[in-house]
Amino acid sequence: MTVDASPGREAKGEKSPLLPQEHDAGAISADDGGGAHIHRSVSWVLLSFLILGEIAGQGVFALPLHLGRLGWLAGTVTCVGALVLNNVSLRIMYEVSRRLPDCRSQGDLAGTLFGTAGRAFARVVISLYLFSTLSAYLNSLGRTIMNEMYSTRVCLPAATAAALVVLIPFAQLRSYGDITSISLVSFAAVLILVGLIMSASSHVERDATATTSFWPPSNLVDSLTSVGGFFFASGGGQCAFFEYLSEMERPQDYHRTLWLTTPMLLVLYFGTAATMYSRFGDKVPGFLLDILPFDSTRLLGNSLFFFHIIVSFTILNTTLLRGYASYSVTDNSWAAKREWGMMSAVVLGGAYVVTNIFSVFEDMTAALGALLVTTVVLIFPPVYLLSAARLARGGDASVESGEGAEGGGGDGIGRGGGDSKGGVGGEGGGLGTATWVGLYLMILFGMVVIPMTVWGAMVRLIHDAQDTAPPFSCGPCVTQQCIEQIKNVSSIAMLATRDPGAATSAR
């Protein structure tokens, strides 16, 4: 089956933006069925670190708080379950790609299965998800700069402007092959940072009133918000799935990346969250970098975090812009670079404005994340596979054969047996009864989880919106002096609940 790569582009004889205009003889390539070559230079190992760089963003440093809100039982189940569901979601996407091998993006896929309206809907959802995440990353970069300057107060608009200057050259990277090496270094930076936090936390005295709980100790709103926090931290890989696959040396090795990334994320996520929760209980900091002392350790830790978020931003920015570029990502012409530079400037400028206009920006991104991340992870993939299976039953030859992704290497999703064509299973690429049931259950689970987590995030957003600051305000004070004052006030308030006379003396 010939798949329309993008509306109007192939009809004019133009190449897909994901396909190089000139074949590099030194690179591994594959024919897409139409004579054009796909630049394949990314091994499955390097792709694993690219996916780790995308998924393991800033969420890992807030997971101890979420574990504390959910308690040991619900927190552990949610952490493991979110990672497993994301793994299954990506395996489903791989099975879809084997049935529709000509698709080069989720927009192409949705257009093939659901027509123009489906293509538009998928592009809007994914673009909104990517842009909101990029804006959240810019906000984090600005706050990191503010944390670095802990002896002098720096306002958020100035800090995010400085972050933009650093981001500009990284935002010009177009091919994932150009990002894989720095994504490996980025993940190493995360591991070093976690080590620094663990070491620093061992010197912090545990609050005498801190407790841990087996059952969820928080109210329903906080619990649902934390469920969304785990899904936000664990979800990823779907938006750029087809683009990742198009640059792999051996696309049939994709399932190997999942065997590497999911266990690594589980060890990192749950290991960090469980260690810090057991150490600080329900008094664990909402953001782990706050544990670092006001010395060179804090400077080093924030610098490592800054670099990691820069790389995460670069990966998602590339994913977003590739969907709109009219030139190949390997086209080194001035026109191609100019177009990419203009688009990246629009994204960076838009993220800067959004970040500084809304004082409840973090709550807004949490609400959008609760809606969009779970939709992209839990709803889109099973709907795609069910629709592709129905299309196969309609008699389309290439879909029935289960060809795609250079064949083989499936992960067992499907009917099984047949001609051993990997995960497609069986002749005709049909789905077994158990797979059909599993896909519908996944959709049903998503339809239950999404409104619950969105409701929790919206309640918090409405509550925090009662105390809003004007656009482009200075933002929170994170200097050493401000933080110590807040700690002193909290200590006095806690002392007042035990001994009012002592609290008065402390003032």
Image (cartoon, rainbow, N blue to C red):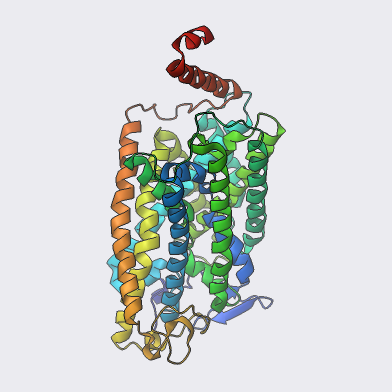
The location of residue 45, given as percent across then percent down, is: 63, 68
Residue name at image x 36 percent, y 74 percent: 385
Instruction: Indicate left or right for 286 with 39 as reference.
Output: left
- Please tell me in which quadrant of the rendered image residue 324 appears: bottom left
Q: Nearer the viewer, residue 19 or 135?
A: 135
**Quarter location, residue 260:** bottom right
Q: Residue at x 45, y 38 (%)?
A: 355
- 347, 222: nearer the viewer: 222
**Residue occupying image coordinates x 63% and y 71%:** 43
Residue 392 percent coordinates (x, y):
33, 84
- Considering only vertical position in the picture, is 82 above or below 475? below
* Number of dots carrying numbers: 0
Q: Residue at x 30, y 39 (%)?
A: 459
The N terminus, quarter of image? bottom left
Taking depth in this image into account, of 482 and 74 the one nearest to the observer is 74
Residue 203 drawn above or below residue 457: above
Can the viewer see residue 238? Answer: no
Say whether residue 352 is visible. Answer: yes
- Furthest toward the right, the residue is 296
Locate residue 140, reporting x and y percent. 52, 40
Residue 364, percent across and down? Answer: 37, 41
